[in-house]
Amino acid sequence: MKLRVVLEPCEEGGYTIYVPGLPGCISEGDTKEEALKNIREAIELYLETVEDDYVRTEKSEQIEIAV
């Protein structure tokens, strides 16, 4: 899966990074590399909670797709 992220330098140093397609998915880091590492973890946790909210019924079918 590919997601677009926005990396912004902070005035006090470091970076803030967020995912426009995942509201509220935001992180930060002292370096670009650290910010990117942290947002990957934040994305994984974000998507994990979305999956936990899924309610299955007897007629539902779960299918994985690549985007």
Image (spheres, rainbow, N blue to C red):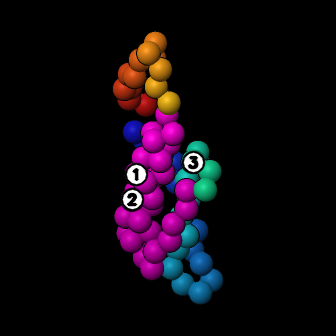
Separation (CA) of disc 3 from disc 2 = 13 Å
Q: CA distance from mark 2 to mark 1?
A: 5 Å
Q: Helix or strand or loop: what does disc 2 sit on?
A: helix
| Label 1 or label 3, whichever comes before in sequence order | 3
- Amino acid carrying label 2: it is Glu
Q: Secondary structure at mark 3?
A: loop
Q: Are marks 1 and 3 in contact (CB under 8 Å)?
A: no
Q: Residue at x 45, y 79 (%)?
A: 30
Q: Is 32 drawn above or below residue 25 in the view shown?
A: below
Badge 3 is on which residue? 22
Q: Are marks 2 and 1 in contact (CB under 8 Å)?
A: yes
Quadrant position of the N terminus in the picture: top left
Quarter of the figure with residue 58:
top left
Which amino acid type corresponds to the residue marked 3 in the rendered image? Answer: Leu
Nearer to the camera, 27 or 45 = 45
Query: Residue under circle 2?
Result: 41
Identify the residue shown where x is 51% and y is 79%.
14
Relative to 40, is 18 on the left or the right?
Answer: right
Residue 51 percent location from the top left of the image:
45, 39
Asked whether 66 or 4 is in front, the reply is 66
Q: Mostly what secondary structure, the magenta segment?
A: helix
Picture quarter containing residue 26? bottom right
Residue 63 on the magenta segment: no
Residue at screen point 47% across, 20% down = 57
Q: Left or right of 47: which side holds 21?
A: right
Q: Outermost residue, top direction?
A: 59
What span is colored magenta in the figure?
Answer: 25-54
Which residue in the structure is indicated by mark 1?
A: 44
